[in-house]
């Protein structure tokens, strides 16, 4: 993916330079970048090129370099995330099944729920797991959007039980109470009994 992006940028740089009637020597003088670097850039052979160097070079050609990340498949999860899901799963009744990385139902959708719970009757409940609450409001917006897009009515927010996470949950008590009214004890009581919670809730594990 990175090599393809570099080749694409190199082709665009070369095409823009030729369209402007500029030589590599001219671009070299105006940017302070060496001709050898510019040549490698245009051939997609400059993996160490900095964003600043490319932005300066494109600016001389009358172009603005822009970059923006887009979601493409589930992110890699670390060991702490896997352990959090494992701790949660250990507290479920045998009749509750849990599968992880469950894509949203829309065709071609790249987003996924961290997990989905299903009871013996076929009912389901989605789950998002967070090892660190660095931006609870952003997490809440992301979950709310996924709920709307996937037609989901309730979700369990699974959070690692750390001092920092507990402090964040206390600071945003009003938001948590509104979005996730069930407590850890209430959610786990239902799941240990083999039932899915009927409302959203937060679980600290």
Image: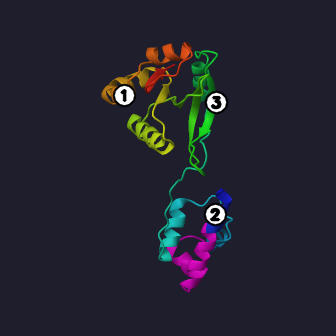
Q: Main secondary structure of the magenta part?
A: helix
Residue 72, compared with residue 186, is above or below; it is below
Residue 195 rendering spot, x and y as whole percentages: 53, 18
State yes or no: discs 1 and 3 in contact (Cβ < 8 Å): no
Q: Is residue 25 visible?
A: no
Q: Residues within 10 Å of mark 2 (few under 14, many from 20)?
A: some
Residue 195, compared with residue 25, is above or below; it is above
Q: CA distance from mark 3 to mark 2?
A: 38 Å
Q: CA distance from mark 1 to mark 2?
A: 44 Å
Residue 60 rendering spot, x and y as whole percentages: 49, 75
Specify the farthest residue to the front: 121
Q: CA distance from mark 1 to mark 3?
A: 25 Å
Specify the farthest residue to the left: 174
Residue highlighted by disc 3:
99
Judged left or right of residue 67, residue 97 is right
Q: Which mark is nearer the camera, 3 or 2?
A: 3
Q: Foreground: 177 or 164?
A: 177
Which residue is at a point 67% across and 62% down the rendered structure image? 4
* Residue segment shown in magenta: 9-34
| Quadrant of the rendered image containing residue 17 | bottom right
Q: Foreground: 175 or 84?
A: 175
Q: Residues within 10 Å of mark 3 (few under 14, many from 20)?
A: few
Residue highlighted by disc 1:
176
């Amino acid at each position: 993916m990175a090599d393809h992006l570099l080749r694409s940028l190199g082709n665009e740089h070369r095409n823009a330079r030729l369209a402007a009637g500029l030589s590599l020597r001219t671009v070299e003088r105006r940017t302070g970048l060496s001709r050898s670097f510019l040549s490698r850039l245009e051939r997609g052979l400059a993996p160490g090129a900095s964003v600043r160097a490319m932005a300066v070079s494109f600016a001389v050609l009358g172009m603005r370099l822009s970059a923006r990340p887009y979601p493409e498949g589930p992110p890699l999860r670390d060991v702490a995330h896997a352990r959090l899901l494992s701790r949660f799963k250990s507290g479920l009744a045998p009749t509750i099944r849990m599968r992880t990385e469950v894509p949203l139902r829309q065709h071609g959708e790249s987003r996924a729920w961290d997990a989905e719970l299903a009871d013996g009757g076929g009912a389901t409940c989605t789950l998002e797991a967070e090892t660190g609450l660095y931006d609870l409001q952003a997490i809440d917006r992301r979950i709310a959007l996924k709920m709307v897009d996937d037609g989901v009515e309730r979700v369990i927010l699974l959070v690692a039980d750390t001092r920092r996470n507990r402090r964040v949950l206390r600071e945003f008590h009003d938001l948590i109470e509104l979005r996730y009214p069930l407590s850890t004890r209430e959610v786990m009581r239902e799941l240990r009994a083999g039932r899915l919670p009927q409302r959203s809730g937060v679980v600290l594990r």
